[in-house]
Image (cartoon, coloured by chain):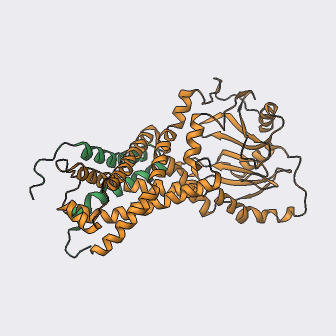
Chain colours: A orange, B green
């Protein structure tokens, strides 16, 4: 690589990192507890547990579930109903002032067998909520998401340029060499290169999928325009649905259409994941992959008849797959710990990068000369 | 890359860990059991290498070049 080319990559690496490092550090630090949000919820006592009952106990209808949840918040309307993949004894009903509300949402966990409201998980307060909001959008809504997505893009530029710069820095060193006997700066340079290169695939994947996740709302919006809008042709001129049909019937018909799938969540008419005239019933398959690639079944909100059941389009699949690949929640507890270790290693890469830049002093040599010094 | 510069001594291990972690990331998406192990080994490898080389004491006389 010519000194000129190296200079260009150095410039890219320096500036993409400098602009994004502080935000990436915030993302890494807040991401660490989020890896363990389930366990932390358990320790904090915010995880909902259903009372012990025989496994084959009969289930109440979804209409009864909704009625139970709404009795807690009569002024709210239904937005989403969901179930955890590993527990079909609890329904989580999310409600808002309108189907598109983003603030003041209420959630009630309802026992799927008795209809008893078990808990009201707080969606908008608590330590984990604050950490989550900082991580997702810095409390700045859609623009915050897009901003963090752009920081993710800069991270990708920093990683790619970092890979290119690995060569000139490591040409005379063996893999894993950390020159501790030299200056602190050289030691941290070697550590930066070592930890950067071993975590590179993970960092690229987590960075890219994080960036994709910041576009989630836009992707869903596009899905509505692209796939849902055409179903609405026959409803043209009809008034907005005010009296929703039976959710139980809609759910039952969706299950008849997709008998091999289980429920992930149901979106009420008017929410982002449905249409004005349909329930969006999202079903999951039984394999690790199809468990994530939820399958949308759109059900007429009044008659309960299935209007469409299609494979999610590629952009939705991309979004759905970007979630586990970002969260690291698909390989049990060992994977959570590995995710945490990789996150900490990334923090060290970011911190050492910052240190190397700060420690350079005002009279900076051009990149080529500097690197000559480092590899000599 | 300069003609004649040694590719494998420089990129061998980085490529190995890149492919290993890639396999680890994919493994868990495919299935349980053996696939989980693929994930743990795949992601554990780079973690172990980073920690081992990062914490290892002074390498004996590596600088005598």
- Percent x, y of residue B64: 9, 55
Q: Is residue A299 above or below residue A32?
A: below
Out of A70 and A9, give the one closest to the viewer.
A9
Quarter of the image holding residue A166?
bottom left
Q: Is residue A101 left or right of B47 when viewed as pictured?
A: right
- Percent x, y of residue A273: 71, 53
Out of A292 and A371, give the one closest to the viewer.
A371
Q: Is residue A92 left or right of A20 when viewed as pictured?
A: right
Location of the N terminus of chain A by quadrant is bottom left
Q: Is residue A115 above or below residue A201?
A: above
Residue A270 shows in the view: yes
Q: Is residue A247 left or right of B30 when viewed as pictured?
A: right
- Percent x, y of residue A358: 34, 53
Q: Is residue B65 above or below residue A366?
A: above
Residue name at image x 42 percent, y 42 percent: A340
Residue name at image x 25 percent, y 63 percent: A370
Out of A146 and A258, give the one closest to the viewer.
A146
């Amino acid at each position: 690589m010519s000194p000129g080319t190296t200079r260009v990559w150095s410039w890219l690496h320096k500036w993409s990192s400098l602009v994004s490092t502080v935000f990436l550090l915030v993302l890494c630090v807040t991401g660490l507890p989020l890896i363990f949000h389930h366990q932390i919820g358990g320790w904090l006592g915010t995880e909902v547990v259903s009372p012990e009952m025989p496994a084959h106990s009969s289930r109440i209808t979804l209409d009864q579930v909704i009625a139970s949840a709404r009795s807690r918040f009569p002024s709210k309307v239904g937005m989403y109903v969901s179930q955890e993949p590993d527990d079909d004894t609890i329904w989580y009903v999310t409600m808002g002032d309108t189907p598109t509300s983003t603030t003041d949402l209420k959630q009630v966990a309802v026992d799927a067998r008795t209809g008893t409201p078990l808990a009201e998980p707080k969606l908008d307060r608590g330590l984990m909520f604050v950490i989550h909001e900082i991580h997702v959008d810095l409390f700045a809504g859609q623009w915050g998401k897009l901003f963090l997505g752009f920081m993710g893009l800069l991270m990708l530029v920093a990683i790619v340029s970092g890979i290119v710069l690995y060569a000139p820095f490591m040409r005379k060193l063996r893999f894993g060499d950390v020159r501790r006997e030299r200056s602190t700066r050289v030691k941290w340079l070697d550590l930066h290169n070592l930890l950067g290169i071993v975590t590179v695939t993970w960092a690229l994947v987590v960075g890219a999928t994080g960036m994709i996740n910041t576009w989630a709302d836009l992707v869903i919006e596009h899905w509505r325009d692209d796939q849902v809008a055409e179903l609405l042709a026959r409803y043209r001129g009809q008034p907005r649905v005010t009296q929703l049909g039976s959710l139980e019937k809609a759910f039952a018909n969706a299950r008849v259409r997709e008998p091999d799938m289980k429920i992930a969540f149901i979106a009420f008419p008017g929410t982002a994941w449905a249409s004005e005239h349909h329930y969006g019933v999202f079903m999951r398959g039984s394999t690790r992959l199809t468990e994530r690639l939820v399958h949308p079944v759109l059900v007429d909100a009044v008659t309960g008849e299935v209007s469409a059941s299609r494979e999610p389009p590629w952009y939705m699949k991309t979004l759905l797959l970007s979630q586990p690949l970002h969260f690291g929640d698909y390989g049990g507890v060992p994977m959570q710990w590995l995710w945490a270790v990789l996150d900490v290693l990334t923090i060290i890469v970011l911190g050492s990068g910052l240190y190397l830049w700060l420690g350079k002093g005002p009279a900076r040599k051009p990149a080529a000369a500097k690197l000559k010094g480092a590899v000599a | 890359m300069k003609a004649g510069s040694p590719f494998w001594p420089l990129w061998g291990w980085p490529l190995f860990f890149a492919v290993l972690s890639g396999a680890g990331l994919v493994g868990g998406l495919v299935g349980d059991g053996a696939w989980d192990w693929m994930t743990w080994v795949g992601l554990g490898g780079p973690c172990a290498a980073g920690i081992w080389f990062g914490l290892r004491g002074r390498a004996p006389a590596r600088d005598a070049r």
